[in-house]
Image (cartoon, helix red, strand yellow):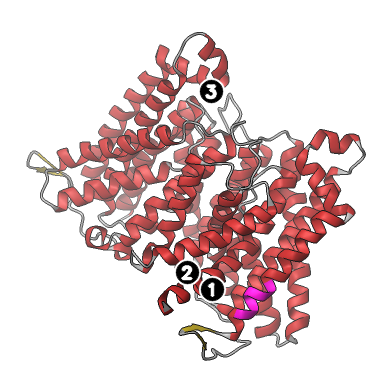
Amino acid sequence: MIENYILHILILMSIYSIFAVSYNVALGYAGLLNLGHVAFFGLGAYTSALLTKAGVPFVVAFICAGVIAAVFGYLLVYLTRELKGDYLVLATLGFSFVFTSLMLNWRWLTRGPLGLPGIAKPNIFGLVIKGNLMYFIFVLIIAAICLYIMWRIVSSPFGRLLEATRDDELGLRVLGKNTFNLKAKAMTVSAFFAGLAGSLFAHYISYIDPGTFYIMEIILILSIVIIGGVASFKGSIVGTIILILLPELLRFLSISSSILGPLRQMLYAVVLLGLLMYRPRGIFGRVDLE
Amino acid sequence: MAALLQFTINGLIAGSIYALVASGFSLIYSTNRFMHLAHGATVAVGGYILFTLFSLLGWPFFASAFLTLIFTGIFGVGLFRFVYLPLQNKKASNVVLLIASIALLILVANSIQLIFGATVKSIGLITVSKGLNFYGAAITPLQIIIIGVSIVIFVALYVFMKKTKLGRNMRAVADNKELASVVGINQIRVADWSFFLGSVLAGIGGILIGLEQNIFPDMGTMLIIRGFTGAVVGGITSVPGAVVGSYLLGLIENYGIWFLPSGYKDAIAFLVLLIFLVFKPTGLFGLSKGVKQ
């Protein structure tokens, strides 16, 4: 029983570490103020769940989850290419609201607020991933691969160009670089991995509804990235571990679940506010959020 | 024809409520230049205070409503003084303030849920009255009051901004911060007042929504999305623009459900927001300043 609980926490950490690091690629490295990242996670989750329900093999659905999210990532960055600061934040936030309300209302496809229950466990060429231990090993391998690829991306010359775009876009343009192209690539990569994380999440929890991908998750993912430090790779991983563990402490206070829900959300909101006010650079942060 | 009239009336009622939220939001934005999304939480606080004073404690309605407005005003100033001002003093960017405001929105909504529970509450001042028949469309007396009160408030707000010294100071700060401080306008005091007045407007919105519909902990999120959409449509830096934009949004939403199921109301609102942000971020009446900076 207790092993299962610990494995559950470890699985969530692995999935969220992909999600958080992918967010940091766009927000931290490329300086794209995107509050629509949760929608990419949700897009991946819905794509993968619906495809496997329609009989598509898991491996194909998993890749499609990333690709669909990436396509929307490109679309979002293309549409908002002229916007800066607050307006970019609002537009990306609006994008995630459009996603949620479409999932709520596109009933014949998504069953609306009822959500999608009974999402099958991953079946990889006949090997069914079942049980928490097996799922943990599975997500750990996937997370290691995803994190490795993202690490290679941000530490490559391309990654340094991204950081340069963040720090001095005009200067980079003067040097003849196409900064929109750089940002678009960063966002597409970021959305792709968020979509993969969403797929892993959907097949683990086996039930998703539009509420899973709402404003609360935005607070969580922002807190993870900010507590670890914007544009810090290991920071996002450490942040994931801290913030997935933190609300688990509330479980030890024997309180009813109707109080636990709001308390957990308040905790995340307070953590985020406290960070912004007292330690905006987080643990390993090198740059400010601007 | 009756259907068209009914959609128009529904659009105007929704628009009045959105405009109350949007006008305060835009007043605060134009003087302080950051997006105070926790403004939605102020509306919810207003609704719940009225519920506590009037429905739970049984105080007279007008006294409860008056206290609600004072309290929401102070609540808004408190948010500014205890969260936004310290952040500004640390040279935090507008985006950081915006993120802080989302955290506040979540914090307040969940605090309300913790205190009052997740179930919807109704104020119950006016028992549901039968709609009056207006050329085949239904409208309740309360809905007429909502539209009337909103219009009176918007006219008063307009006169206040144009004619009083404080209103002029606010517009001066909105126009050019440096120049306003050079001529000796105390910016923090102007910011305090903008938060107070904006939050009182939110309180009025909270009271009217509480009377017309039910109140629930997360109501602020839905309302601020409508509020800032209305403000973006009209031009976020212009208070009258935000009011007009909100009415337009109310009408678009209600005409939209002519073609789509009513659940798509939200999606329509967000699409309007995205379309305006992408193609006309300055809105219909806003200044272009600040959009691309």
Is B146 placed above or below B75 here?
Answer: below
Q: Which mark is residue A258?
A: 2
**Residue B2: x %, y % from top left:** 43, 79
- What amino acid is at disc 3? Arg
On whether disc 3 and disc 1 are found on a single subunit, the reply is no
- What amino acid is at disc 2? Ser
Image quadrant of residue A68?
top left
**Residue B152: x %, y % from top left:** 73, 70
Tell me the distance, in whole angstroms, between the alpha carbons under discs 2 and 1.
8 Å
Of labels 2 and 3, the one closer to you: 3
Mark 3 lies on a secondary structure that is: helix
Q: Which residues are magenta?
A: B144-149
Magenta portion: prevailing SS class: helix
Confirm whether residue A245 shows in the render: no
Q: Is residue A71 left or right of residue A33?
A: left
Sequence-first disc among 2 and 3? 3
Q: Which mark is residue B117?
A: 1
